[in-house]
């Protein structure tokens, strides 16, 4: 197996680190923590550039706009915030949600921001003005995730009510209710061409949906427990799924056929990420490790050890040369490939 080296250990948070995100050009990393702060780090030096302080409860996630100038955070304190990257100062507090806000996503052009909440709603915001554009109502339980289509014209949401929904981002109208799962939908994602949505569920299955019709085209069954993640390869040929059953599975999107089961983790696998060129797949686990896999052979390329608690998030840098990981041990790490 090849050796993946730790380039930097980013220490400073005093609580679990929930997520990591690279800036569009890869020079900065954002971390979100249970300690009620987010931080911006210099990737080259590992130094803290700014501590984004202002939330009063744990920060679940941080995301950069494609324009890089702003970063947004969501928290249990119900109020998402938008920050200036250069100064680290808050620009807007996005008021409207009434319960903790769980996830966040920018549209591909950076002109719209989506937030999902325990209050059963999704909100679309103009991040430049801080004004609400649409409130997307229809889910009847917590909304766990939202993702924009590659062209930004649709949004998919994943709900605790066992459904996903497709929305028109221009009008806020619900286009399709994706019903069929028999448990909470933990996440949802678009294929690179925007024609297919994958949804993962507590019922142990993943479903593929046609975004034009809302029809379920495939049911991917094989995991023996909750499926936490579903990630398309950059070319859209493969889907990687991450499960509570400690495995990762690779599926052929066109046919729904199970291609490989990637085994080696000893605890729940929470999320996966493909390298930008599709040559590697990373998986983050509650067993305190990250594994790097060859999607072609299904073999482990490297096991990244060093975290002392669950790894909550893993992402590749835009150029694919670095991985960033976030852990419940209170640190983030940068790894060189």
Image: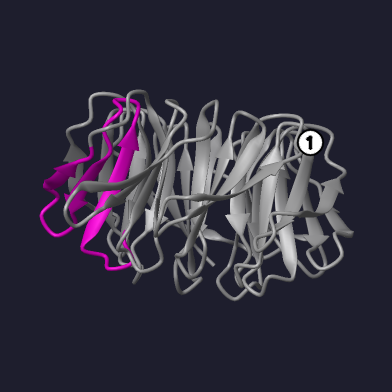
| Above or below: residue 203 compared with residue 72 | above
Percent position (x, y) of residue 44? Answer: 30, 65
Q: Nearer the viewer, residue 76 or 179?
A: 179
The quadrant the N terminus occupies is bottom right
Q: Quadrant of residue 3?
A: bottom right
The residue located at (87%, 43%) in the rendering is: 222
Q: How is the image coloured?
A: one colour
Percent position (x, y) of residue 113? Answer: 34, 52
Percent position (x, y) of residue 91? Answer: 13, 48
Q: Quadrant of residue 285?
A: top right
Q: Nearer the viewer, residue 297 or 44?
A: 297
The residue located at (24%, 54%) in the rendering is: 127
**In the visual, does 237 lie left or right of 14?**
right
What residue would you read off at disc 1? 204
Q: Is residue 271 magenta?
A: no
Q: Is residue 55 visible?
A: yes
Label 1 environment density (alpha carbons within 10 Å; few <14, some 14–19, many ≥20): many
Residues in magenta, as a range: 65-94
| Above or below: residue 120 compared with residue 252 | above
Q: Is residue 307 visible?
A: no
Q: Secondary structure at mark 1?
A: loop
**In the visual, does 316 lie left or right of 31?**
right
**In the visual, does 115 lie left or right of 293?**
left
Percent position (x, y) of residue 305? Answer: 58, 45
The quadrant the C terminus occupies is bottom right
Number of numbered callouts drawn? 1
């Amino acid at each position: 197996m090849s050796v993946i080296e730790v380039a930097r250990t980013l220490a400073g948070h005093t609580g679990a680190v929930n997520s990591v995100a690279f800036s569009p050009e890869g020079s900065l990393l954002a971390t979100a923590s249970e300690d009620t702060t987010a931080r911006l780090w210099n990737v080259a030096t590992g130094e803290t550039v700014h501590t984004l302080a202002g939330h009063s409860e744990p920060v679940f996630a941080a995301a950069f706009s494609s324009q890089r100038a702003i970063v947004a955070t969501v928290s249990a304190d119900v109020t998402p915030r938008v920050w200036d990257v250069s100064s680290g100062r808050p620009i807007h507090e996005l008021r409207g949600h009434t319960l903790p806000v769980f996830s966040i996503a920018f549209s591909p052009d950076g002109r719209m921001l989506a937030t999902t909440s325990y209050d059963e709603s999704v909100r679309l915001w103009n991040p430049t003005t801080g004004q609400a554009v649409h409130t997307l109502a229809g889910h009847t339980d917590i909304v766990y995730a939202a993702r924009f289509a590659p062209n930004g014209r649709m949004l998919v949401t994943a709900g605790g009510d066992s459904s996903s929904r497709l929305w028109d981002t221009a009008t806020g109208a619900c286009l399709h209710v994706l019903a069929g799962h028999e448990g909470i939908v933990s996440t949802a994602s678009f294929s690179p061409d925007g024609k297919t949505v994958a949804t993962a569920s507590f019922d142990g299955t993943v479903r593929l949906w046609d975004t034009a019709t809302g029809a379920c085209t495939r049911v991917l069954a094989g995991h023996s427990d909750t499926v936490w993640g579903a990630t398309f390869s950059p070319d859209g040929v493969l889907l990687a799924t991450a499960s509570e059953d400690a495995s990762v599975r690779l599926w052929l999107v066109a046919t729904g056929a199970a291609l490989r089961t990637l085994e080696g983790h000893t605890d729940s696998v929470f999320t996966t990420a493909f390298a930008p060129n599709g040559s590697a797949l990373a998986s983050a686990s509650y067993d305190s490790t990250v594994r790097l896999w060859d999607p072609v052979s299904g073999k482990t390329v490297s096991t990244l050890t060093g975290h002392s608690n669950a790894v909550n998030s893993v992402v590749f840098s835009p150029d694919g040369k670095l991985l960033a990981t976030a852990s419940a041990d209170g640190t983030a790490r940068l790894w060189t490939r």
